[in-house]
Amino acid sequence: MSEHVIQKARFDSKLRVYLFLSSMGILLLTVIGIPLIPIWLFLGWWWAGRYFDSIQCDLTERRLRIRRGVVFRKDKTIMLDKIQDMSLQHGPIQRWFGITTLEVETAGGSGTQGQADAKLVGIVDAQAFQEAVIAQRDRISGQVSPASSAPDDSNYVSTNALLADIRDTLHRVEQRLSSAE
């Protein structure tokens, strides 16, 4: 049973060039990688194209599903109610290419401290996609987003009623404890 896809992320075609050149840069910086550069000139462009074609990110009603990979395929599902932060990163090379990285951090995530649980590089209009994910997360968690109008008074009333019940229960417990002494 698959969920309804609310929005599919589109990836910028410049991402293929960025992937190819960033991998080439890594080879140039390593002694072991320098002899591999001629092979990478042929194989790398093919790999970057295949990797670009494999990337998918779907926002559903309750999940963010990310799929990618050429040789080793990765399919990751992030529950929207677990998302704590989504940040946009624009490094100098990414700015030159006009692409952005959207980093997703979750509660109890698998990433180490300071590391995102998912990084999506090259999403077209990453800020709009980020806002769509956050809006859907807020919808399913029942939070009031800043864009909404007035706060819900029924939630305020039910919270006050619950607090009054707790107060009354504590008073009854105190009375029973004092009468038992």
Image: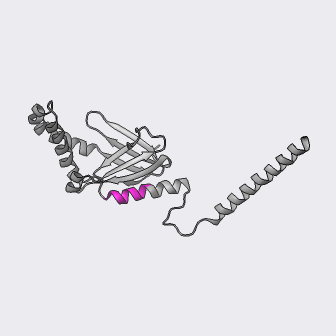
Q: Nearer the viewer, residue 69 or 40?
A: 40
Q: Can you name the residue that lies furthest to the bottom here? A: 149
Colour mapping used in the image: one colour
Q: How far across and how far down the image is residue 164, in percent?
A: 75, 57
Question: Could you say which is closer to the camera, residue 99 or residue 111?
Answer: 111
In the image, the segment drawn in magenta is 125-133
Confirm whether residue 13 shows in the render.
Answer: no
Q: Main secondary structure of the magenta part?
A: helix
Q: Residue at image x 33%, y 56%?
A: 126
Front residue of 105/176: it is: 176
Q: Is residue 131 left or right of residue 45?
A: right
Q: Which image quadrant for residue 77? A: top left
Does residue 147 appear anywhere in the picture?
Answer: yes
Residue at image point 61% right, 65% down? 152
- Tell me the quarter of the image containing the C terminus: top right
**Residue 1, position in %: x, y?**
47, 43
Image coordinates for residue 93, horizontal then vertical, percent: 21, 51
Would you say residue 42 sits in the magenta stretch?
no
Assess whether residue 126 is covered by the magenta stretch: yes
Side (left or right) of 102 relative to 143: left
Which residue is most to the left? 38
Q: Position of residue 55 (x, y in %)?
A: 29, 45
Q: How many marks?
A: 0
Comparing 119 with 124, the one in front is 119
